[in-house]
Image: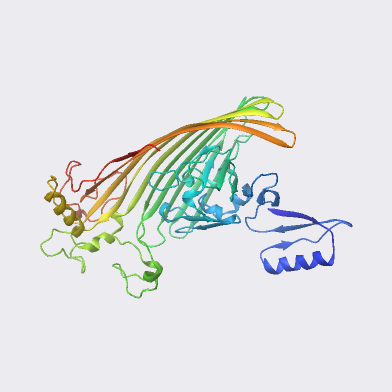
């Protein structure tokens, strides 16, 4: 992609061009052509068109990433990590693709990720909380995006946003193409990365055109034992209603499963003392399950099998599963020249769970305290895991009436939304007591006695929230 600028040849312009070439070694300038005016083309990696990058014809400070920039990014990179290409955004992620939901950090000016609003095709995405929220990268694939536009200061007050204190980021999808076609892309990388993207387009069929796409990504963790698995579906139907009127229907399904990596502080990174798996530095990570006869994994004195605290460092006890679906429909009606009305309805279904380890010593402490308080519980039988489930739905409607009045525009709108979610927690010593399609313990002796869902280890509350 190119950035075009019209300049008049002069000594000053020549000095500026030389300075730019020296400061940006990856850019290349073409020779000026013509007599009175010349066009200098500067080509850089993932740099947007200048008019879009600085937000011309916008009330607030707006920056944007164009489709060409999105497609030039590494395959599989998350939609959130793409924001690092925008001026004013500082994005840090755990891993090159930014897929680990609990390892994302975004800063723009004085605002962090929880204070930035996100919108996908006119649909607000809700909270950015990875547990019970609606992070935007669950609902977008770069191949299906037309532009990502961000207001880094005061956001557009006419846009619906759940949590913004200023910045708003809009993800706008491409419209279905008019010709029938099939697009296939496959990528391979380090750590067993394999990603396949397929999009099938119907082309124009009467007043309708549509596409459906599927993305499948599989990869090993970049440190420690474990995998990342993501299956993402998107579908869009566009209907021409005559004149300037149209309707759009959208569907997104995201199925995400990954194993965790332990927190790595600078002290641990620089430490010469290896972890339980014998690794140091960037190689520190959870290990595979080993028999309790392994040195360092013997049961504690008087304790059951697999009661050694080192078992909390095994990968099977730290994972995340998210299953989300988003449905949306937009109707745009052209009323008169420069006057139009638009309404968007949406429904989101959220579900998933997370697993984290709990040492035998801590489980025994909680068991002792709660039984002393009169609660009927089952004694811990070894290293346990805590299973936290989350579910809920979110639905709403946005409306807008727009009227162009010469050099000015007037808009009025309404936004209503209901967001409910519930969270439960329970503890178990049976790692196979989860979704049967997911990996389980490799050492069958660790499964222990079969535990029913009524075999309670610890009491915690179930929470339901209605913002």
In this orientation, does residue 265 appear? yes
Question: Looking at the picture, does residue 40 appear above or below residue 118?
Answer: below
Colour treatment of the image:
rainbow
Of 404 and 315, nearer the camera is 404
Q: Residue furthest bottom?
A: 272
What percent of the width, then of the height, locates residue 20?
72, 65
**Image quadrant where residue 39 sits:** bottom right
Side of 218 where 161 appears, left or right = right
Task: Say which of 261 and 131 sits in front.
Answer: 131
List x then y, in percent, for residue 402: 64, 31
The image quadrant where one finds the C terminus is top left
List the single residue furthest toward the left.
Answer: 302
Give the residue displayed 18% in from the left and 42% down from the top.
Answer: 452
- Decide if residue 380 is in sight here: no
Q: Residue at x 26, y 50 (%)?
A: 386
Left/right placement of residue 302 relative to residue 76 reads left
Task: Give the answer, above or below, for where 193 lies relative to 434.
Answer: below
Where residue 246 sits: x, y (%)? Answer: 62, 28
Left or right: 310 in relation to 337: left
Residue nearer the viewer, 215 or 243: 243
Image label count: 0
Residue 406 horizontal/vertical position (percent): 75, 34
């Amino acid at each position: 992609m190119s950035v075009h600028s019209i300049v008049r040849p002069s000594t000053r312009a020549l000095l500026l061009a030389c300075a730019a070439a020296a400061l940006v070694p990856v850019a290349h300038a073409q020779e000026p052509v013509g007599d009175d005016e010349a066009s200098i083309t500067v080509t850089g990696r993932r740099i947007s068109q200048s008019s879009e990058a600085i937000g011309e014809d916008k009330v607030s400070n707006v920056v944007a990433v164009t489709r060409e920039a999105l497609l030039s990014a590494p395959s599989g990179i998350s939609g959130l990590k793409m924001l690092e290409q925008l001026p004013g955004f500082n994005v840090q992620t755990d891993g090159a693709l930014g897929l680990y939901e609990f390892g994302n950090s975004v800063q723009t000016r004085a605002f962090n990720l929880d204070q930035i609003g996100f919108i996908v095709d006119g649909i607000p995405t809700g909270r950015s909380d990875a547990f019970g929220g609606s992070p935007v990268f669950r609902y977008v694939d770069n191949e299906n995006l037309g532009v990502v536009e961000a207001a880094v200061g005061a956001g557009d007050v006419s846009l619906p946003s759940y949590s913004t204190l200023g910045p708003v980021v809009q993800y706008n999808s491409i419209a279905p193409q008019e010709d029938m076609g099939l697009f296939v892309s496959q990528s391979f990388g380090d750590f067993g990365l394999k990603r396949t993207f397929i999009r099938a387009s119907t082309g124009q069929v009467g007043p309708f055109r549509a596409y459906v796409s599927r993305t499948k990504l599989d990869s090993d963790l970049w440190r420690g034992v474990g995998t990342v698995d993501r299956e993402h579906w998107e579908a869009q139907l566009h209907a021409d209603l005559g004149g300037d009127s149209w309707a759009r229907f959208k569907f997104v399904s995201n199925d995400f499963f990954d194993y965790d990596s332990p927190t790595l502080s600078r002290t641990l990174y620089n430490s010469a003392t290896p972890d339980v798996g014998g690794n140091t530095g960037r190689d520190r990570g959870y290990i595979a399950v080993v028999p309790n006869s392994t040195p360092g994994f013997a049961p504690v004195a008087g304790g059951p099998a697999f009661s050694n605290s080192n078992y909390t460092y095994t990968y099977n006890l730290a994972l995340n599963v998210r299953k989300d679906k988003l449905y949306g429909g937009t109707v745009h009606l052209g009323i008169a020249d420069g006057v139009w009305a638009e309404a968007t309805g949406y429904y989101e279904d959220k579900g998933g769970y997370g697993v984290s380890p709990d040492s035998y010593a801590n489980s025994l402490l909680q068991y002792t305290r709660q039984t002393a308080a009169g609660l009927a519980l089952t004694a811990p039988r070894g290293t346990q895991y805590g299973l936290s489930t989350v579910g809920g739905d979110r639905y709403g409607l946005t409306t807008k009436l727009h009227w162009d009045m010469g050099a000015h525009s007037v808009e009025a709108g309404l936004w209503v939304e209901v967001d409910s979610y519930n969270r439960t927690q329970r503890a178990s010593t049976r790692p196979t007591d989860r979704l049967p399609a997911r990996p389980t313990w490799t050492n069958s002796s660790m499964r222990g006695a079969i535990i029913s869902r009524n075999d309670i280890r610890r009491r915690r509350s179930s929470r339901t929230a209605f913002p």
